[in-house]
Image: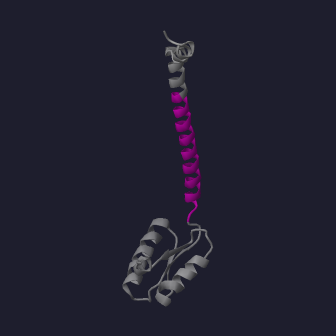
Amino acid sequence: MRSQSAGSARGSWDGHDRKRIAMNLRRRKFLRLAAGAATAAAVARTAHTQALDFPARPVRIITHSAPGGSPDALLRIVADRLSQMWGRQVLALNHPGAGGAVAARTAAAAAPDGYTLYMPASSAFVT
């Protein structure tokens, strides 16, 4: 014979309870997806609004190489293409010295507004 407690525990998992739990889980999943979609839409709208007026002034790209070097030539090609795309001037600035540390320090000291970019030496990231 079964004990009373075992029977009552089994009774709590009847079909009605399982359906209710499944419905709650589906509702939670739906709410998570809806919240994620709403957040993504808000972020996209904000980014689009900010992107509409970028760049509002010239953009500077700083490199570590001296004028005439391969990194400088690549930077000038990229800067010219960005100028065409954005319709704004993109300045290629050379700050040679100290294995790229001078350029890195200059870029790090710039205002964090997206108008100063840094093209580092590839050797700066090799350990």
Indicate left or right for 35 with 82 as reference.
right
Q: Residue furthest front?
A: 1
Q: Residue furthest top?
A: 1
**Can you tell which quarter of the image residue 68 is in?**
bottom left
Q: Nearer the viewer, residue 81 or 95?
A: 95
Residue at point 59%, 52% (across, down):
46
| Residue 66 sits inside the magenta stretch | no
Residue 53: percent from the left, percent from the top? 58, 61
Dominant SS in magenta: helix
Residue 97: percent from the left, percent from the top? 49, 90
Q: Residue furthest right?
A: 111
- Residue 4, can we see it? yes
Q: Nearer the viewer, residue 23 or 8?
A: 8
Magenta region, residue range: 25-54
- Residue 96, can we see it? no
Indicate left or right for 63 with 114 as reference.
left
- 64 above or below 59? below
| Residue 40 sits inside the magenta stretch | yes
- 85 above or below 49? below
Which quarter of the figure is the C terminus placed in?
Answer: bottom left
Residue at point 57%, 16% (across, down):
5
Residue at point 52%, 29% (across, down):
25
Residue 118: percent from the left, percent from the top? 50, 76
Residue 18: percent from the left, percent from the top? 50, 20
Q: Nearer the viewer, residue 1 or 125?
A: 1
The colour mode here is: one colour
* Tally of numbered discs: 0
